[in-house]
Image (cartoon, rainbow, N blue to C red):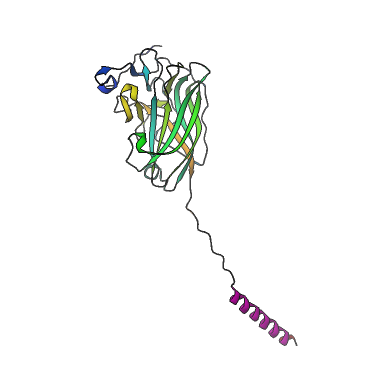
């Protein structure tokens, strides 16, 4: 089923330096039944999400920046921020071990897989959204995304978020025009606690911008983070030791005790 392509309301998405661009934000033109992929996953003992419903993926709800000539995607960056202390009560360092995203549709031009990256950053609360170069990189994982649709996709990626800082997770899909790749991240419009973010320089959005601000408020990205909070450190307990003088006194006392015991028996 062919569906019309939506344009971003902001003129910046259609014009760059006064010239029309050859890319545009568009929805997936085809509805596909669930197939393939990695159906979920998990690790660690803690998980959190900004989605009210982190399992439902709505068809034709997400957009990506695509070539107008071929329909294949350009560089696209999808991200979310997690204020660990403020939103989730995690006041210690947090060890991320994996991230799960929703996938509306991933179709590689050949080979059944396409490249992508999970990137982890940290920053003081309130710094994001900003360019990723203004954040501290704490982990990255290059992945090969298998063909799938309406699926939950999990991958291992590790990094330590310092106590008191915010975690920012980016899922990046490099230009797929040469290889004929299409990718639409999974999303729904069932509610979110904090915004979803999208960046695509070829469509005029160079830094992460909320999907609502670029004209797609219902594109609420499905993403769940897994990991373990580091418990408070327990200082080692000093075990009392007997010094030389203490040992001498102890020997004398034991000797006196033994002498008194023998006198009583005699």
The magenta segment? 240-263
Q: Quadrant of the C terminus?
A: bottom right
Is 216 placed left or right of 172 in the picture?
left
Q: Quadrant of residue 23?
A: top left
Q: Where is residue 161 drawn, in percent x and y?
A: 43, 43
Q: Is residue 181 visible?
A: yes
Taking the view exactly as shown, the residue that stands out farthest to the left is: 18
| Residue pictured at 53% horizontal, 59% vertical | 236
Q: Is residue 193 visible?
A: no
| Residue pictured at 45% horizontal, 31% vertical | 118
| Residue pictured at 26% horizontal, 17% vertical | 19
Q: Quadrant of residue 137?
A: top left
Q: Quadrant of the N terminus?
A: top left
- Up the image or down, 234 lies above or below 148; here it is below
| Residue pictured at 32% horizontal, 40% vertical | 127
Count the marks: 0
């Amino acid at each position: 089923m062919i569906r019309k392509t939506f344009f971003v309301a902001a003129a910046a998405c259609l014009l760059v330096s006064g010239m029309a661009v050859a890319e545009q934000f568009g929805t997936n033109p085809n509805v596909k039944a669930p197939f393939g992929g990695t159906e979920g996953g998990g690790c660690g003992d803690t998980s959190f999400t900004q989605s009210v419903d982190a399992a439902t993926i709505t068809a034709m709800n997400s957009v990506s920046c695509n070539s107008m000539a071929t329909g294949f995607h350009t560089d696209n960056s999808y991200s979310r921020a997690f204020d660990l202390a403020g939103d989730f009560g995690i006041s210690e360092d947090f060890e991320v071990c994996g991230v799960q995203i929703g996938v509306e549709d991933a179709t590689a031009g050949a080979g059944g897989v396409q490249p992508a990256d999970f990137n982890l950053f940290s920053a003081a609360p309130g710094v994001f959204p900003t360019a990723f170069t203004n954040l501290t990189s704490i982990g990255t994982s290059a992945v090969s995304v298998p063909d799938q649709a309406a699926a939950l996709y999990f991958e291992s990626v590790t990094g330590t978020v310092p106590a008191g800082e915010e975690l920012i997770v980016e899922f990046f899909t490099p230009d797929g025009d040469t290889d004929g790749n299409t990718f639409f991240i999974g999303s729904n419009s069932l509610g979110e606690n904090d915004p979803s973010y999208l960046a695509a320089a070829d469509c005029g959005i160079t830094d992460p911008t909320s999907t609502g601000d670029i004209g797609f408020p219902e594109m609420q990205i499905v993403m769940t983070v897994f990991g373990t909070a580091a418990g408070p450190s327990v200082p080692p307990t000093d075990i009392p030791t007997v010094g030389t003088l203490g040992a001498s006194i102890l020997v004398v006392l034991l000797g006196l005790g033994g002498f008194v015991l023998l006198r009583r028996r005699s």
